[in-house]
Image: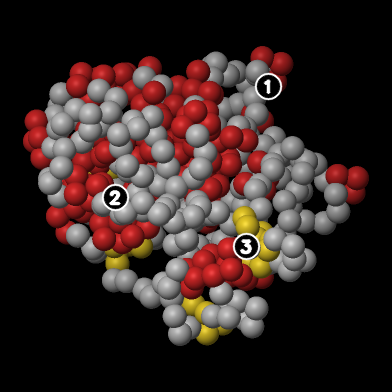
Amino acid sequence: MGNLVGSWRFKEPSTIEECDSTWGSDSESDEPAAEDDSGISDSVSPAESERAAGHAGDSTPQLTDSPESVPKMKRSFYAARDLYKYRHSYPNFRRSRQPNEYRNLRFYLNKIPLVPDGIYIEEILSKWRGDYDKLEHNHTYIQWLFPLREQGLNFYAHELTQDEIKEFQSTREAKRRFLAAYSLMLDFYGVKLLDKSGNVARAPNWQERFQHLNESHHNYLRITRILKSLGELGYEAFKAPLVRFFLEESLCHGTLSNMQHSILEYFVYTIRLPATRRRLLCYARQHYRPAHAFLWGPPTKKRGGGAGAGGSVGAGSSGIRAPAPTPEQQRRGMESTIFTPAGSGNIVSSHNATMCHELAEGGLKGCMGLGPNMGGALMMVGARAERNEFNEMIPL
């Protein structure tokens, strides 16, 4: 079984359309895709990762309603691919042979300090809140506060592993401190965490902090990392309220106008649920000016013939249509991922291929439904949860 699973390889997306299935289903009852338990982190280099998260559009010039005055912009393939891999839990990654030391968890349990500064999490939570100069100019803590399954610029920080994620999510003390760290960073940005559902609002000092955030583009990289880490550590549903808040401030109130591009190109696409991304992008499209320059909507022609039959291509489309989702993908609201086994003509859905990896690692056993070629099956176990204003499940 291990040799069979080892031959399955993830087919790299080659276009932005292949990376983005936000508009691939008309159903609004999508469910989150199953988590991949097969690997640890992307093999992409830190330089490429930074290029993917580079937020090159942060300095987008002010746009007017005149089509002639609008600079021609386009979406970043590197960003789309990076976030696609994140939403699919980093396919193609092999489990590390290094011993799993759970350093991120131990840091959050206040047992080890972050490296290289030698600072413990309790010191950060108790003494750094409101120290905006320190939070702005220290660049080593963010990778420890918000760990990911990918390498950052602090080479002393450790990538998350799937086993560590599971242990983290079951440790009350670690989760308590993680939410305190999230609240700390929100305060730095002029935002207040309102409740356990992730809803947010302006902090009392929002004007001062927004003015700083609007001119501090490297913090957009940090926010992208924070959003990713929320999803990894069990707080996926905290993303949408924050992204919705930033969209409103940027598009409706003009308080964070320089953040527009980063919100739409990066923040929205950290969200794994396609239906939630659609709702956020529909809201953004209503308020984006000039309207014809909006790059993130669906292709204008959703059904019927091609462009030759009277169809047209939306502002955010290159004219290349991604493959239509299968009924199974439509039902689950999954990303349209294709996996192909080496040397074989068979095609396997992303859901089955992901679970095949899990079976090979000894994760799920004794379930039915994968089919004869996979030699196994799946069992999805629900958890007690509550819902936020986006009707998303929040772990209790």
> Residue 299 location in percent, x, y?
71, 45
* Residue nearest the viewer, comparing 127 with 117: 117
Is label 1 in a helix, a strand or a loop? loop
Residue 366 in which image quadrant:
bottom left
Circle 2: is it few (<14), some (14-19), or many (20+) Cα within 10 Å? many
| First-in-chain label (1 vs 3) | 3
Answer with mark 2 or mark 1, whichever residue precedes in sequence: 1
**What residue is shown with label 1?**
72
Q: Name the kind of residue labelled 1 in the image.
A: Lys
Residue at 53% in and 23% down: 56
Rate crowding at label 1 as few (under 14), some (14 to 19) or many (20 or more) other CA atoms within 10 Å. Answer: few
Q: Do the residues under discs 1 and 3 have CB atoms within 8 angstroms?
A: no
Q: Secondary structure at mark 2?
A: loop
- Given the image, on which type of amino acid does mark 2 rest? Gly
- Which quarter of the figure is the C terminus placed in? bottom left
Q: How is the image coloured?
A: secondary structure
Task: Give the residue displayed 26% in from the left and 60% down from the top.
Answer: 167
What is the spatial separation of the Cα atoms under label 2 and label 3, in whole angstroms? Answer: 37 Å
Task: Please state which of residues 124 and 43 is positioned toward the viewer in this rendering.
Answer: 43
What residue sits right under mark 3 in the picture? Answer: 8
- Disc 3, SS: strand
Q: Which mark is nearer the camera, 1 or 3? A: 3
Cβ–Cβ below 8 Å for labels 2 and 3?
no
Q: Quick check: can you spot residue 32?
A: no
- Quarter of the image for residue 173 reads bottom left
Residue 200 drawn above or below residue 168: above
Relative placement, left or right, of 275 versus 222 is right
Query: On the picture, is 103 further left or further right than 23?
Result: left
Q: Which amino acid type corresponds to the residue marked 3 in the rendered image? A: Trp
